């Protein structure tokens, strides 16, 4: 999931699905209506142009703006948006996220590619600022400025145990009370003995999670320890205790032997009792679809609000936009106007869906021609409820967001310029060891010691010192 005249033309010809007959640079029409350009991602949808036409009819009458929706496939989005930015091409609005590569939020804000919306939020667009929960804005703040509108969805995600409901019911497993490896172990033993399977399906991406805010490659704050101290993820007590236990599980046959190489998608068709995934509080149905089994879930660790989670999806305005105020007007409308948010997210009423109640819908056959990732647009709390979804889902999500613990580093962004070479070397060491150690596939202490030696040689101490200096300075500014 993620990432010039002649160059721009090549990009448009090479894979954009455009919602208008032509992709024009932002301009004001003769009627005074401002035409905006908005880049989005996702699997290209057949009815983007049809929905775009309906959007423009609505926004032209109500907001005096129109927009050209340009959809780029997941696999090309990062590269093409980076090319547009690097070429200085003019556009208005685009989707970004903390997890994208070249077009991620932090990198592009710091290099001046994004429009600073701080003053607009404090003046013309106070309604937009008030609509979105405060910690989203904190996590989107870079060096005291805000450069994007975060999608108001789950503000944090955490690792969950995912249990096979068939076996939970068969053995009457009290899954909701299982939070630790020690609490899980008796049930692993039972399932191993009675079912004859490796009960825990683990894949190479598993991390033995604990409360840690990773501010750069494996370096950050242990929220179970000294929250003022910058440390390495792999050498803290909570991690070492967990990974030693997983090594024991591997030796006892509780974990699949190929875990260090296995992909999470390989779980389909296999027999298992428990696995894990990073998810939000409303994602159980999605996980069920991914693993092709009925499941129940429980969080392994408390949710932490970090910069990365707060800006897990959002919209930004290009620094080269000719109409930043009109672009902000549209973004405020998307986040506050229920009709517009549902039109962009679900498509056209009567074509792609029909309402079954004031706030509930069911899909029509044409839904398959317009299936969008909603977080590209904005505020989940204005979405209608899909058929089968609980009608209190947004209240549940609001409560979750308000209760999630904010990292003490929320709003702090590490400037990596002084240690770029060291971070690259550190990442290489991490990639060498992490899957093997995390899955218990090798002896724990021996390999942790080897990893630590190599990380120290890569410049770990220099990275920690630089981050600690910046973090201490930032904390003083917050007082």
Image (cartoon, rainbow, N blue to C red):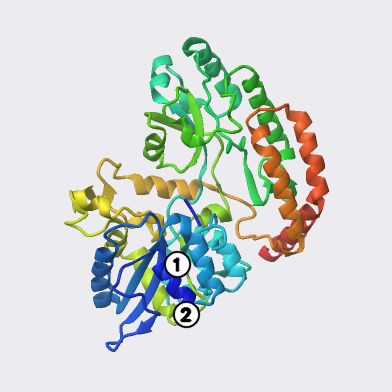
Is 45 displayed left or right of 135 in the figure? left
Q: Position of residue 306 (x, y in %)?
A: 58, 52
Look at the picture and state if 303 lies above or below 144.
Answer: above
- List the single residue furthest toward the bottom: 30
Quadrant the C terminus occupies: bottom right
Is 367 displayed left or right of 245 in the figure? left
Residue located 52% across and 18% down the image:
187
Q: Tell me, for residue 22, which label it has, or none.
A: none
Q: Position of residue 109 (x, y in %)?
A: 58, 69
Residue 359 seen in this snapshot: no
Cβ–Cβ under 8 Å for marks 2 and 1: no
Counting labels gives 2
The residue identified by callout 1 is 94
Q: Position of residue 466 (x, y in %)?
A: 77, 58
Q: Position of residue 33 (x, y in %)?
A: 30, 83
The residue identified by callout 2 is 5
Look at the picture and state if 110 lies above or below 348.
Answer: below
The local secondary structure at tag 2 comes to helix
Residue located 20% across and 49% down the image:
365
Residue located 38% across and 34% down the image:
288
Crowding near pointer 1: few (<14 within 10 Å), some, many (20+)?
Answer: many
Camera-near label (2 vs 1) is: 2
């Amino acid at each position: 999931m993620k990432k010039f005249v002649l160059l721009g033309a090549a990009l448009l010809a090479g894979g954009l699905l455009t919602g208008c007959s032509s992709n024009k640079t932002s301009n004001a029409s003769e009627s005074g209506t401002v035409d905006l350009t908005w880049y989005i991602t996702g699997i290209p949808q057949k009815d983007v142009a049809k929905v775009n036409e309906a959007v423009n009819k609505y926004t032209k009458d109500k907001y005096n703006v129109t927009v050209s929706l340009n959809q780029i496939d997941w696999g090309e989005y990062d590269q093409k948006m980076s090319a547009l930015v690097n070429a200085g091409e003019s556009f208005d609005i685009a989707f970004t996220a903390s997890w994208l590569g070249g077009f991620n939020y932090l990198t592009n804000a710091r290099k001046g590619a994004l429009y600073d919306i701080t003053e607009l939020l404090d003046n013309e667009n106070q309604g937009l600022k008030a609509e979105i929960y405060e910690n989203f804005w904190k996590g989107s703040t870079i060096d005291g400025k805000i450069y994007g509108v975060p999608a108001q969805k789950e503000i944090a995600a955490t690792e969950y145990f995912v249990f096979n409901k068939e076996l939970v019911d068969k053995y009457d497993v009290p899954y909701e009370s299982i939070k630790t490896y020690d609490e899980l172990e008796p049930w692993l033993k039972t399932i191993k003995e009675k079912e004859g399977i490796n009960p825990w399906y683990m894949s190479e991406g598993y991390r033995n999670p604990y409360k840690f805010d990773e501010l750069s490659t494996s370096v950050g704050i242990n929220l179970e320890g000294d929250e003022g101290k910058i440390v390495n993820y792999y050498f803290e007590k909570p991690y070492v205790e967990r990974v030693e236990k997983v090594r024991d599980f591997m030796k006892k046959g509780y974990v699949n032997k190929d875990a260090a190489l296995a992909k999470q998608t390989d779980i389909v068709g296999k027999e298992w009792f428990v696995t894990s995934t990073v998810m939000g509080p409303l994602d159980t149905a999605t996980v069920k679809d991914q693993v092709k089994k009925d499941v129940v879930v429980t969080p392994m660790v408390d949710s932490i609000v970090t910069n990365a989670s707060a800006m897990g999806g959002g919209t930004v305005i290009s620094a080269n936009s000719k109409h930043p105020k009109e672009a902000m007007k549209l973004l405020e409308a998307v986040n506050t106007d229920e009709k517009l948010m549902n039109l962009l997210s679900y498509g056209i009423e009567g074509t792609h869906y029909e309402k079954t109640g004031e706030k509930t819908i069911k899909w029509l056959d044409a839904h398959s021609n317009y299936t969008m990732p909603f977080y590209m647009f904005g505020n989940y709390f204005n979405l209608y409820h899909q058929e089968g979804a609980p009608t209190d889902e947004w209240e549940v999500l609001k409560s979750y967001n308000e209760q999630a613990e904010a990292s003490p580093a929320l709003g702090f962004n590490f400037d990596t310029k002084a240690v770029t070479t060291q971070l690259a070397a550190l990442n290489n060491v991490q990639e060498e060891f992490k899957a093997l150690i995390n899955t218990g596939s090798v002896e724990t202490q021996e390999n942790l010691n080897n990893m630590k030696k190599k990380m120290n040689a890569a410049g770990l101490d220099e990275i920690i010192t630089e981050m600690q200096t910046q973090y201490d300075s930032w904390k003083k500014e917050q007082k």
